[in-house]
Image (cartoon, rainbow, N blue to C red):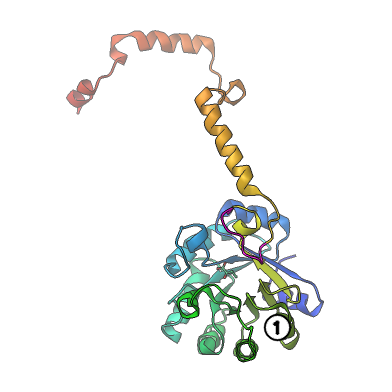
């Protein structure tokens, strides 16, 4: 079944959970497509996972387009959402619509996601008016890391919890068709999910959300240094990759790889002629000869 804005919203109505993962390349997109994941996010987390930055702030619209277009070529039924990076929508409503349009036209996304609540509703309204579906993102918004002073759980006191609830209502009213809740206490996220008619997608927000999203390298255990509390390793691909890289290194050095099964054959008569030709003078081309010809 093709996933669309309508089917994702219907899933909430039917009490069916929505699965979403980040993805940044064609090969992984093909695997996710075959796995029945409902939606893929080209997250600006690619700044960290793919580009090695320490946060998402340096990511550009062109970076997202590059990865989004690659992923789009591997998808058929999975819904594709592209993140709007830092300063691609905060600067003006005009910039927001223009950059959202680029993510759709050049990145082949079906929707865009942007961070912020009441403060970005003007942008959400304008993008939706351009017929581009919007996913909002509230709670911990990593593009505000400098304002927040780090990656911390949001909404733990009354004032901040009510602010997040108000932001959720505001983005729904502005026309967002779905909202991401990041690092919000479970009970608050559950209440927000009950209060909204649009689906909530949680990351570090508990099981009361209408769906879940994870960064795929996190859930595959590709980073071993640090595991946030909300991440579950569904596999230990990082260890398996390291094992394979080490084995390759050792087989190349010991000449165990490549072996007969990986090599191509040539007729012995053909090879005999090639050897004879190679032994004649005209085949011993030297750099000097090449220079003379030029
Ligand atoms: O960029 C990203 O990967 C995200 C998810 C954490 C929701 O925004």
| Mark 1 surroundings within 10 Å by alpha-carbon count, few (fewer than 14), some (14 through 19), many (20 or more) | many
Q: As rendered, which of 204 and 117 lies closer to the eye?
A: 204
Residue 257 in view: yes
What residue span does the magenta drawing correspond to? 223-231
Quadrant occupied by the C terminus: top left
In terms of image quadrants, where is residue 79?
A: bottom right
| Left or right of 112, for residue 15 | right
In the rendered structure, does residue 229 fall within the stretch colored magenta?
yes
Residue plotted at (50% across, 26% down):
253
Residue 39 in view: no
Residue plotted at (28% across, 10% down):
281
Which residue is the extreme one toward the front? 157
Quadrant occupied by the N terminus: bottom right
Whether 282 is drawn above or below 28: the answer is above
Residue plotted at (44% across, 67% down):
59
Whether 68 is drawn above or below 270: the answer is below
Image x and y of residue 2, in percent? 71, 66
In terms of image quadrants, where is residue 267?
A: top right
| Left or right of 168, for residue 148 | left
Image x and y of residue 250, in percent? 54, 29
- From the image, tell me which residue sits under label 1: 188
Q: Quadrant of ligand 1?
A: bottom right
């Amino acid at each position: 079944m093709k996933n669309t804005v309508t089917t994702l919203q219907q899933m909430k109505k039917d009490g069916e959970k929505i699965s979403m993962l980040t993805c940044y390349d064609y090969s992984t997109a093909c695997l996710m497509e075959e796995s029945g994941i409902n939606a893929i996010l080209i997250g600006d987390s690619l700044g960290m996972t793919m580009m090695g930055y320490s946060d998402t702030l340096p990511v550009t619209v062109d970076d997202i387009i590059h990865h989004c277009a690659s992923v789009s070529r591997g998808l058929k039924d999975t819904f594709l959402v592209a993140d709007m990076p830092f300063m691609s929508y905060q600067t003006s409503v005009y910039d927001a619509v223009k950059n959202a349009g680029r993510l759709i036209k050049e990145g082949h996304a079906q929707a865009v996601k942007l961070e912020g609540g009441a403060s970005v509703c003007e942008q959400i309204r304008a993008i939706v008016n351009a017929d581009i579906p919007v996913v909002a993102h509230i709670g911990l918004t990593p593009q505000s890391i400098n304002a927040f002073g780090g990656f911390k759980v949001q909404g733990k006191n009354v004032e901040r919890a009510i602010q997040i609830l108000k932001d959720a209502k505001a983005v729904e009213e502005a026309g967002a068709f779905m909202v991401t809740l990041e690092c919000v206490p479970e009970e608050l996220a559950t209440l927000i999910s009950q209060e909204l008619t649009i689906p909530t997608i949680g990351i570090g927000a508990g099981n009361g959300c209408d769906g879940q999203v994870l960064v795929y390298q996190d859930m595959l255990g590709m980073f071993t240094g640090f595991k946030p509390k909300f991440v579950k390793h569904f596999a230990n691909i990082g260890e398996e990759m390291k094992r394979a890289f080490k084995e390759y290194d050792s087989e190349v050095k010991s000449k165990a790889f490549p072996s007969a099964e990986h090599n191509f054959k040539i007729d012995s008569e053909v090879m005999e002629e090639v050897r004879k030709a190679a032994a004649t003078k005209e085949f011993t081309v030297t750099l000097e000869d090449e220079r003379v010809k030029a």
